[in-house]
């Protein structure tokens, strides 16, 4: 006879056994589910046929078999650079355009740019220090226009706090996504220069300490207003705006800005560069990075993409300094100066700005792809939002900001009709920013079709992203991974994202 205590013991054992068996069953179901998911490929397409980040029917990997089709091979066991993000630039011009819209329309644009699920999920942004050519909400300004105020007693960021200012723009965007900010400066306060004449725009040495304090105040003031500046670049396109030499930039980093930021406990990292093209990185950076007292303060190397098509310079730069991430921090189309002077437009580029045609995105997609394949870790476009006239721009001839300055943006807002246009650039860039997250690595991908431009990446969660630009007619291609294959049709003049889980991670 079994007493009550024994009965309870048997019952408890039975319950534990049942729970154990149920748990095993659920685990087996989960494993089967994961194994199934590991063979599933999610596919997203933007194309000349009208697809816009369109979700296609899922595909799956099957056992490899012989095929005469072109092949793309993906191998995550070979890693290259770590990715830091994709995005564009906060300027007053963009906020002016946003503020011309209804509240709902404005919020939708920001969601389309920053929300990682609904939109593009931008993660790397640029925000200039003081005025630049698209600080369009008023006259030229810096944060201290009081001559001789070396202690920065009159330093203020009031302009950036105004309704069309950078801080409201950044805060409105941060509701929808997480991003880091890099900040360069076109010009220091005018009174710090020898003069504003070309060739004399050098900082007077007696103001080096004051300039370092200016950068410090900028970072601290933004922090006090709820915005973190993650990266600082001392000068934007030195030699184009200021005449400050790279030797002086090195001295400022080594003896003034670097030690001051360190003494104040700032987490803001210093970048070297903002050269107008990649060739100048090879000309100017090596001499500075040979000095260990400069090098120890540098986080990353930055350049602008205006030397169209010279991506190989970036591999040369990486080979010289493999320890530093390389960031592309500005590029755009621009019509500047007078009606017959085109600048920042490549051969066979557009003859009218801004560009509404989706087909223009193919050019930008190839720019991004070729930079990634040459060791670039972050890619940041210039103006994120402009109006139907490619503006508005700031006019300040003493600071090289001319009356005519039409540019192309990621998003075009018609301030008259309130129509919002997401450009071809928007969609091609989104295929990178949406599916390749900070911390991902570019991984090995090889193939044999000259019409397909592609690169593969592995995110922190193990998922693999393959981006493929088809620069020609529709074609089929075999994607080969771990001796498994899928046949994928790539639409004519399109970008396709294939994303799947990496089995071993599961």
Image (cartoon, rainbow, N blue to C red):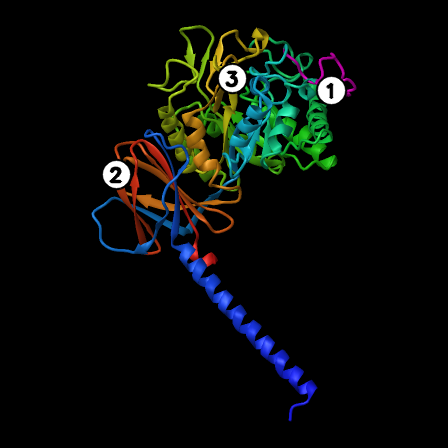
Label 2 to label 1: alpha-carbon separation:
57 Å
For disc 3, the marked residue is 418
Q: Quadrant of residue 151?
A: top right
For disc 2, the marked residue is 475
Between 283 and 26, the one nearer to me in the picture: 26
Picture disc at residue 142: none
Q: Position of residue 291 (x, y in %)?
A: 58, 35
Determine the secondary structure under disc 3: loop
Q: Is residue 414 visible?
A: yes
Label 1 to label 3: alpha-carbon separation:
34 Å
Determine the secondary structure under disc 1: loop
| Span shown in magenta | 140-158
- In the picture shown, does residue 300 fall above or below 359? below
Q: Position of residue 216 (x, y in %)?
A: 71, 28
Q: Is residue 290 visible?
A: no
For disc 1, the marked residue is 156
- In the picture shown, does residue 311 fall above or below 412? below
For this view, does 452 lie left or right of residue 307? Answer: left
Q: Earlier in the sequence, mark 3 or mark 2?
A: 3
For this view, does 231 lie left or right of residue 66? Answer: right
Q: Position of residue 492 (x, y in %)?
A: 29, 33
Residues under numbered marks 3 and 2 in contact, where contact means CB atoms less than 8 Å apart: no
Between 298 and 423, the one nearer to me in the picture: 423
Q: Quadrant of residue 161?
A: top right
Quadrant containing the N terminus in the rendered view: bottom right
Determine the secondary structure under disc 2: strand
């Amino acid at each position: 006879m079994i007493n009550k205590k024994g009965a309870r013991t048997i019952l408890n054992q039975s319950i534990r056994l049942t729970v154990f068996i149920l748990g095993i069953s659920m685990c087996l179901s989960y494993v089967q589910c994961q194994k199934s998911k590991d063979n599933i490929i999610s596919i997203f397409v933007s194309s000349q046929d009208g697809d816009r980040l369109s979700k296609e029917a899922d595909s799956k990997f099957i056992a490899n078999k012989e095929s005469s089709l072109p092949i793309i091979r993906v191998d995550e066991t070979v890693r290259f650079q770590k990715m830091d993000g994709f995005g564009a630039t906060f300027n007053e011009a963009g906020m002016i355009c946003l503020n011309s819209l209804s509240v709902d329309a404005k919020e939708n644009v920001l969601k389309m740019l920053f929300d990682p699920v609904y939109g593009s999920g931008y993660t790397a942004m640029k925000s200039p220090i003081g005025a630049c050519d698209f600080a369009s909400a008023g006259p030229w300004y810096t944060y201290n226009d009081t001559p001789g105020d070396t202690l920065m007693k009159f330093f203020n960021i009031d302009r950036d706090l105004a309704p069309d200012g950078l801080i409201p723009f950044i805060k409105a965007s941060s509701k929808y996504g997480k991003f880091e900010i890099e900040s360069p400066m076109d010009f220091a306060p005018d009174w710090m220069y020898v003069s504003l004449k070309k060739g004399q725009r050098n900082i007077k040495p007696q103001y080096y300490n004051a300039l370092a304090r200016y950068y410090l105040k900028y970072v601290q003031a933004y922090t006090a207003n709820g915005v973190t500046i993650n990266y600082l670049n001392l000068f934007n396109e030195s030699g184009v705006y200021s005449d400050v030499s790279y030797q002086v930039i090195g001295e400022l980093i080594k003896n003034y800005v670097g030690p001051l930021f360190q003494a104040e406990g700032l987490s803001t990292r210093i970048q070297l560069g903002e050269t107008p093209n990649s060739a100048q990185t090879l000309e100017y950076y090596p001499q500075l990075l040979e000095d260990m007292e400069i090098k120890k303060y540098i986080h990353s190397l930055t350049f602008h993409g205006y030397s169209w098509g010279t991506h190989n310079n970036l591999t040369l730069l990486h080979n010289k300094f493999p320890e530093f991430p390389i960031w592309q921090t500005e590029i755009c189309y621009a019509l500047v100066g007078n009606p017959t002077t085109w600048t920042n437009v490549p051969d066979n580029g557009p003859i009218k700005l801004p560009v509404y045609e989706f087909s223009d995105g193919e050019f930008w997609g190839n720019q991004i792809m070729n930079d990634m394949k040459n060791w670039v870790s972050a890619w940041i476009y210039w103006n994120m939002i402009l109006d139907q006239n490619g503006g508005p721009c700031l006019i300040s001839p003493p600071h090289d900001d001319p009356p005519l300055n039409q540019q192309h943006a990621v998003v075009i807002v018609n301030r008259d009709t309130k129509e919002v246009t997401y450009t071809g650039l928007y969609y091609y860039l989104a295929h990178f920013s949406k599916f390749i997250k900070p911390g991902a690595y570019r991984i090995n991908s090889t193939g044999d079709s000259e019409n397909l431009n592609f690169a593969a990446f592995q995110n922190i969660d193990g998922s693999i992203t393959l981006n493929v630009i088809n620069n020609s007619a529709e074609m089929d291609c075999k994607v080969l991974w771990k001796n498994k294959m899928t046949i994928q049709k790539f639409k004519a003049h399109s970008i396709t994202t294939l994303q799947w889980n990496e089995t071993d991670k599961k």
